Image (cartoon, rainbow, N blue to C red):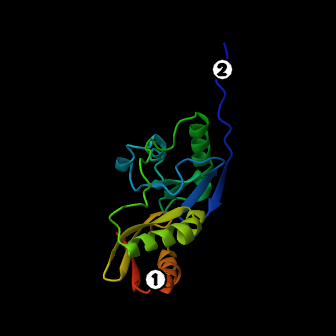
Amino acid sequence: MLQAQKRPVHLYMEANPNPNSLKFVANFMLTDDGVSFDFPDEGSTQNSPLAKELFNFAAVERVFIAANFVTVTKKEDVAWEDIQDHLRNHIKNYLESGKNAVNVHQDKDPLFDEHDSETVKKIKGILDEYIRPAVEQDGGAIVFHSFHDGVVKVLLQGACSGCPSSTITLKAGIENLLTGMLPEVKGVEAEGI
């Protein structure tokens, strides 16, 4: 009897500016380009068996899945040295089994909304082209939430959520870029922090 071949998975760990988050990077895409999934608690994991399993580790506080990586945020009182290899092995074994990291597929482009104003379309385009790749490098995402009275509101996800340097990134990076490129933007705020 032939045994099914395991998917070859190469997984490495990468630190990011949030000391409580660690990025586990795979050698293939886990989600569609530009699509991310944030799981702030076990109750939010109905679409991701992988995230649900990771919450079985008592030290796990949050799970974020995007592109080709999984970012795990740990509880502050736990050292990475105590859990990182266990998490890495669990993620690797899960992916080798051939199961999807997330069981949701987008029917339409999450950035596109035909009802968006021209300014909102430009804001989303700038966030997608200039900001998303840099923030994904750090294991997180910043997602457009709203634009009203000159203020862009964004959601911080993954390693960005609770990161000590997220305020600097928000103000010095994103706000400067958006206000410099679009005169109608006066400021940027994070929603839900």
Residue 72, horizontal then vertical, whole percent:
52, 55
User: Mark 1 is on which residue type?
Assistant: Leu
Decide which of 100, 54 is in the foreground and name it.
100
Q: Residue at x 48, y 80 (%)?
A: 178
Which of these two is toward me, 7 or 178? 178
Image quarter for residue 14? bottom right
Q: Position of residue 51 (x, y in %)?
A: 46, 46
Residue 95 at x, y = what percent?
58, 40
Q: Please rate how many residues cluster around mark 1, counting C-alpha atoms within 10 Å: few if below 14, some from 14 to 19, many from 20.
A: some
Q: Nearer the viewer, residue 187 or 74?
A: 187
Residue at figure coordinates x 60%, y 64% from the top left: 137
Of labels 2 and 1, the one closer to you: 1
Q: Amino acid at mark 2?
A: Gln
Q: Which mark is residue 3?
A: 2
Above or below, 70 relative to 187: above
Q: Which element carries disc 1, helix, strand or loop?
A: loop
x, y percent for residue 48: 44, 43
Q: Which element type, helix, strand or loop, lies under badge 2?
A: loop
Q: Is residue 116 left or right of residue 143?
A: left
